[in-house]
Amino acid sequence: MSSKKMSTGDMVAIGLMLFALFFGAGNLIFPPALGQAAGTNFWPAIIGFLLTGVGLPLLGVLAIGLSGHDHLQSMANRINPTFSLIFTVILYLSIGPFFAIPRTGTVSYEIGIKPFLPATTGGFDIGLLIYTIVFFGIVGWLSLNPSKIVDRVGKLMTPVLLIALLVLLVATFVNPIDKSMAPIGDYIDNSFFKGFQEGYLTMDTLASLVFGIIVINAIKAKGVTDTKKIASLTLKSGLIAAGCLGFIYLGLGYLGNTANFAAGEANNGPTILTEASAAHFGIYGNIILGLAIIFACLTTAIGLITSCASYFQTIFPRLTYKQLAIIFTLFSAAIANIGLSQLITISVPVLVAIYPIAIVLIFLTFAEPLFKGRVEVYRYSLLLTGIVSVIDGIKAAGLPLGGLYDSLGAILPLFDAGMGWLLPALVGAVLGYVISLTRNSDPKELKKAN
């Protein structure tokens, strides 16, 4: 069967679909908070954020497209089957029902619905309960037919999302509310690295290892079968998504950077967005923002439910895709009701622990021709990366480890900035390569592992 040529319109639709899948709850609330807290150090902070929020997700999608694998787990099998299974399951649960999917419900409620409801004082939020039932009911229904995801997301929902956001961001650039304030916290001395770590919270680099499969399948569904064409179209679609993400991140960051008068020193993404929108457009600003939030979170939730159900069906073949989609939808709706602040607090240590592993795996995939796919390079680099990143995660959770933190801070460059895993990753790669040479390791072992 000959490979077909995909139209420009279809390619743009897939690129917009990818953007919409990426652009969800965290993408909306973290850039404004960064923009305000970074203050006059906005540019180094936002550049760091763009690296993990745009650059690394693009590389993740390309890594999937270039690797020739049809699943993240098969891509990670080159290291070790047990590692591959554990890492893939943790990743899917993190960007799925444990954190990211519930967050789509809580964020869209906090910004899109709650400002229009009467003020409440503590206690159980019945409004959130009702909203999550409706929101996840729609998500579950749309997720039951994954073959329609490109048409529903790429061609219908995404343009509505982009238009709503562009109206708000244009007003922000043309008529900023206030000037930048002085930076606070880690943004005073480590603004770039703080911004880099804030990009973890979007979970997009993790999601890219999942959404890349959706892009490839969407391209194949258009009749394209040639490997090189698939890789090329994956790159083009990824660039479309990255361009949209980059522009909107800059806009939302600038909105937070200039919203001090309206929002006060909130350092809270939902509050900054709500108050800034109201300052620009009054009640209409909140309506515009509400539409953008709901559509952004809806599209991301659909993509994540679809991906998680498809993956876990390979582990639990007795369950159908539809049964798993319903299970994940109901579980996510229940978790969403613990509230946004609690979700973020719980997710941070996990993300700090697994994000560096995903980053190193992506870069090793691109660098594979340099070391000819020697398995030891993957294993030792990821082993040392994982040891440090797990310690970072424990530190982020606030758990005491005696003087270990101080010791590592004295040994590892950038440890206090949350980037102490960089040197171990490099040392592990070199060590693995040397060991592979002493063992006369056959690079073809990589292919056998896959």
Image (spheres, rainbow, N blue to C red):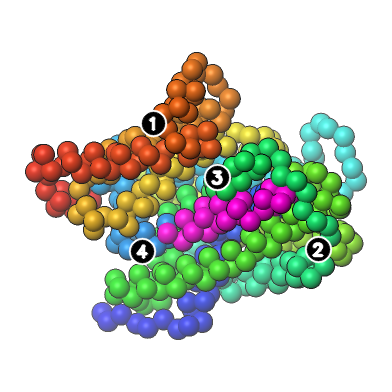
Q: Outermost residue, top direction?
A: 402
Residues under labels 4 and 3: Cα distance?
29 Å
Asked if residue 372 can be seen in this view, the reply is yes
Residues under labels 2 and 1: Cα distance?
44 Å
Residue on which disc 2 sits: 176
- Marks 1 and 3 close (CB-CB < 8 Å): no
Sequence-first disc among 1 and 3: 3
Sequence-first disc among 4 and 3: 4
Residue on which disc 3 sits: 193
Identify the residue shown where x is 44% and y is 54%. Answer: 210
How packed is label 3: few (under 14 Cα within 10 Å), some, or many (20 or more)? many
How packed is label 1: few (under 14 Cα within 10 Å), some, or many (20 or more)? some
Residues under labels 1 and 4: Cα distance?
28 Å
Numbered disc in front, either 1 or 4? 1
The amino acid beneath tag 4 is Gly
Residues under labels 1 and 3: Cα distance?
20 Å
The span picked out in magenta is 35-59
Residue on which disc 4 sits: 65
Side of 123 relative to 92 (left or right) = right
Identify the residue shown where x is 52% and y is 33%. Answer: 416
Q: Is residue 282 covered in magenta?
A: no
Question: Residue 51 in the image: x percent, y percent?
Answer: 52, 55
